[in-house]
Structure formats: C-alpha cells, structure tokens
Image (cartoon, helix red, strand yellow):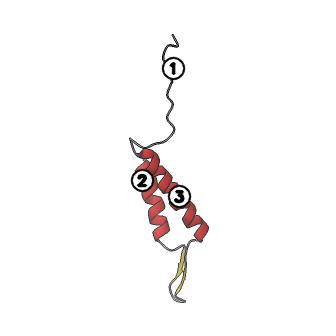
Amino acid sequence: MAADTEATIEDALAAPRRVKADGVEVEQHPLPDQVDAARYLDAKAATAKRNSLGVRLTRLVPPGGD
C-alpha cells in the first residue's frame, strides 16, 4: 500500500496540474508543493532502509558498576 501511495505521488508530480487543449495552456504544479512531495518521498525512502543510522537507543553500563 505504501508503494502505491508513493507511485501515486510521483505520477501526480510528473503530470501537469491543468491542461487546456484548444488554447494550448499547460499549468505546472506549484514549486513548493513539488519540493514538499520530494522531501516526503526522500524521507520515506531513508526510513525504509534497514541499516540506516536513525535514532538508536543503547544502554551503557560502566565497568565495575555492578
């Protein structure tokens, strides 16, 4: 399902926002929307990696601290 959402977002950004046939008018998606969608997809891909360095919690036990 996540792959479907990502594919839908990528397809929507690749296609124009609005097209008029006879007047040959094409409107692109606003740049801030494109940037936000690219950031979302990049963040999604970064968190999907198995060995990525995200937040890692470890418990440190000093030697001799029984």
Q: What residue is disc 3 on?
A: 39
Q: What residue is disc 2 on?
A: 4
In the image, taking residue 52 as reference, residue 33 lies left or right, namely right
Residue at the spot x=49%, y=13% of the render?
A: 64
Instruction: Residue 62: give its label.
Output: 1
Contact (CB < 8 A) between labels 2 and 3? no
Q: CA distance from mark 2 to mark 3?
A: 17 Å
Q: Amino acid at mark 2?
A: Asp
Q: In this rendering, which labeled residue sits more in front, label 1 or label 2? A: 1
x and y percentages locating residue 20 in the rendered image? 53, 82
Secondary element under disc 2, as helix, strand or loop, is: helix
Q: Amino acid at mark 3?
A: Arg
Secondary element under disc 1, as helix, strand or loop, is: loop
The residue nearer to you, when weighing 32 against 16, is 32
The residue nearer to you, when weighing 60 against 33, is 60
Residue at the spot x=49%, y=41% of the render?
A: 54
| Residue extending farthest front | 64
| Mark 1 or 2, nearer chain start | 2
Residue at the spot x=56%, y=71% of the render?
A: 29
Q: Residues within 10 Å of mark 1 (few under 14, many from 20)?
A: few
| Mark 3 or 1, nearer chain start | 3
| Mark 2 or 3, nearer chain start | 2
x and y percentages locating residue 24 in the rendered image? 52, 88
Establish if 11 lies above or below 42.
below
Residue at the spot x=51%, y=24% of the render?
A: 60
User: How many marks do you count on the picture?
Assistant: 3
